[in-house]
């Protein structure tokens, strides 16, 4: 979980700071950051939201930390990150229309 350490250091935070935010012990957070303990889905989501990155980025499934979301209909969004990071605005609009027509 090297990315967690990098993200934390970029914000000039201590492991203790994240542990307090997540309501876990400092050693528990340290184990997550070093990979000695698996990260739970709720902690993964909280960290992704806190750092404003995708969960895939934290897990090492992509090198792109950005989250791209398109709203298809009110209350229905699609997150584009790993599979389509380079879509243009026009391509996103075409995708949005295709999803509306299929739905």
Image (cartoon, rainbow, N blue to C red):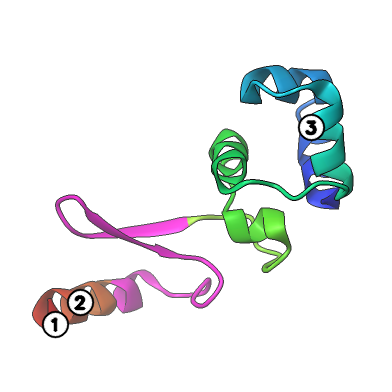
* Of the image marks 3 and 1, the number of the one nearer the N terminus: 3
Circle 2/circle 1 CB separation < 8 Å: yes
Q: On screen, 86 above or below 39? A: below
Report the mark closest to the observer, 2 or 3: 3
Res. 99 mark = 2
Q: Residue at the location (56% across, 36% down)?
A: 46
Residue that label 1 marks? 102
Q: On screen, 50 above or below 12? A: below
Instruction: Give the magenta part as a residue range.
Output: 68-92
User: Would you say residue 14 is visible in this rendering?
Assistant: no
Decide if residue 8 is on the left or right side of residue 53. right
Seen from the viewer's position, the closer of residues 29 and 98 is 29
Decide if residue 96 is on the left or right side of residue 69. left
Judging from the image, what secondary structure is the residue with disc 3 in?
Answer: helix
Res. 2 mark = none
* Of the image marks 2 and 3, the number of the one nearer the N terminus: 3
Q: Residue at the location (45% across, 59% down)?
A: 68
Residue that label 3 marks? 29
Seen from the viewer's position, the closer of residues 45 and 54 is 45
Q: On screen, 29 above or below 72? A: above
User: Would you say residue 57 is visible in this rendering?
Assistant: yes
On whether residue 87 falls in the magenta region, the answer is: yes
Q: Residue at the location (35% across, 69% down)?
A: 89
Judging from the image, what secondary structure is the residue with disc 2 in?
Answer: helix
Residue 22 placement (x, y as % from top left):
64, 26
Report the mark closest to the observer, 3 or 1: 3
């Amino acid at each position: 979980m090297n990315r967690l350490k990098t993200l934390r250091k970029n914000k000039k935070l201590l492991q203790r700071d994240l542990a307090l935010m997540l309501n876990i012990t400092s050693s528990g957070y340290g184990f997550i950051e070093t990979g000695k303990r698996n990260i739970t889905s709720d902690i993964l989501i909280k960290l992704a939201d806190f750092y404003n990155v995708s969960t895939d980025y934290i897990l090492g499934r992509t090198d792109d930390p950005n989250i791209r979301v398109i709203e298809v209909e009110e209350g229905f969004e699609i997150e584009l990150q790993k599979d389509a990071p380079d879509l243009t605005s026009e391509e996103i609009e075409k995708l949005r229309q295709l999803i509306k027509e299929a739905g």
